[in-house]
């Protein structure tokens, strides 16, 4: 999958290891906002760890087991596009026909529908091109924005994995949402 427009001023494109410095700058702007909702291993704190995160997804992509795409936004006056968030396949298993999609976004880019559009593109590709039968979306039950995206994607809540992962204040529940291939309708 190559670069795809999301809006007149936003584009989705692969987020590759050579973009580690740009990714780290983005994480520095987004860190406090996304830290409660994403895994600690994702929120890189230096160039080496940023490169390692992107390399992990590049390696998964090479194995056909995941992938990551960034969202670049251009400002109101002509300027260099800025990485503001992205979407990924945390896991991708064509043999089982199941994948898990995820996302993140810095606060300055919220409210534009970028995540719903970007996630819709990768889910559509997974279902239509790759034959994925079930797309999962896992989120903290307190993450209202993530749950809203799952709903806009036509997903249903399957249930809660109680105290599934460690968090800063103790163990955290994870809600699982999903959409099946025969239910999938790409959002407008």
Image (cartoon, grey):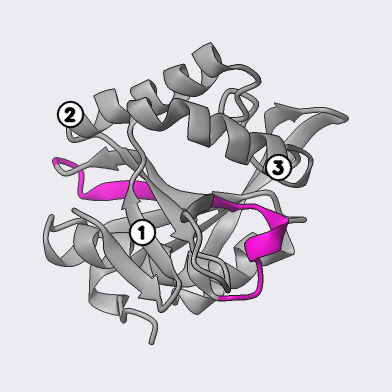
Asked if one can make out residue 173 in the rendered structure from this viewpoint, the answer is yes
- Residue 111 magenta: yes
The dot on residue 73 is none
CA gap, disc 1 and disc 3: 19 Å
Element under disc 3 = helix
Label 1 crowd (10 A; few <14 / some 14-19 / many >=20): many
**Helix, strand or loop under label 1:** strand
- Compared with residue 180, is residue 188 higher up or lower down, i.e. above or below? below
Compute the Cα span from label 1 to label 2.
Answer: 19 Å
Check residue 62 in the rendering and tell me which mark sits there, or answer none. 2
Compared across the picture, whether 145 is left or right of 50 comes to: right
Residue at image location 13% in from the left, 58% down from the top:
131
Nearer to us in this view, 41 or 82: 82
Q: Residue furthest front?
A: 78
The span shown in magenta is 95-112
Residue 106 x/y as whole percent: 66, 53
Is mark 1 in CB contact (under 8 Å) with mark 3?
A: no
Q: Earlier in the sequence, mark 1 or mark 3?
A: 1
Check disc 3: other Cα within 10 Å, few if <14, some if 14-19, many if 20+. Answer: some
Which residue is more in the foreground, 90 or 175? Answer: 90
- Residue 10 in the magenta stretch? The answer is no
Residue at the outermost bottom position: 188
- Asked which secondary structure carries label 2, the reply is helix
At a point 31% along the width and 40% down the height, the residue shown is 67
**Placement of 102 over or under 181, stated as above or below:** above
* Mark pair 2, 3: CA separation: 29 Å
Quarter holding residue 153 = bottom left
Residue pointed to by mark 1 = 12
Q: Residue at x 47, y 51 (%)?
A: 86
Residue 156 visible in the snapshot: no
User: For the C terminus, which image quadrant?
Assistant: bottom left
| Placement of 136 over or under 67, stated as above or below | below
């Amino acid at each position: 999958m190559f670069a795809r427009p999301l809006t007149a001023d936003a584009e989705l494109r692969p987020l590759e290891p050579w973009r580690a410095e740009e990714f780290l700058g983005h994480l520095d702007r987004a860190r406090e906002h996304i830290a409660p909702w994403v895994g600690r291993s994702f929120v890189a704190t230096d160039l080496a760890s940023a490169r390692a995160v992107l390399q992990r997804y590049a390696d998964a992509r090479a194995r056909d087991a995941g992938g990551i795409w960034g969202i670049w936004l251009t400002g109101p006056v002509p300027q260099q596009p800025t990485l503001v968030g992205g979407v990924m396949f945390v896991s991708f298993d064509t043999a089982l026909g199941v994948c898990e999609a995820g996302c993140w976004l810095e606060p300055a880019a919220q409210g534009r529908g970028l995540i719903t559009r970007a996630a819709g593109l990768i889910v559509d590709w997974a279902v239509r091109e790759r034959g994925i039968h079930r797309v999962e979306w896992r989120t903290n039950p307190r993450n209202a924005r993530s749950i809203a995206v799952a709903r806009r994607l036509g997903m249903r809540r399957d249930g809660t994995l109680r105290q599934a992962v460690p968090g800063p204040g103790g163990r955290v529940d994870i809600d699982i949402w999903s959409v099946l291939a025969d239910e999938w309708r790409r959002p407008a």
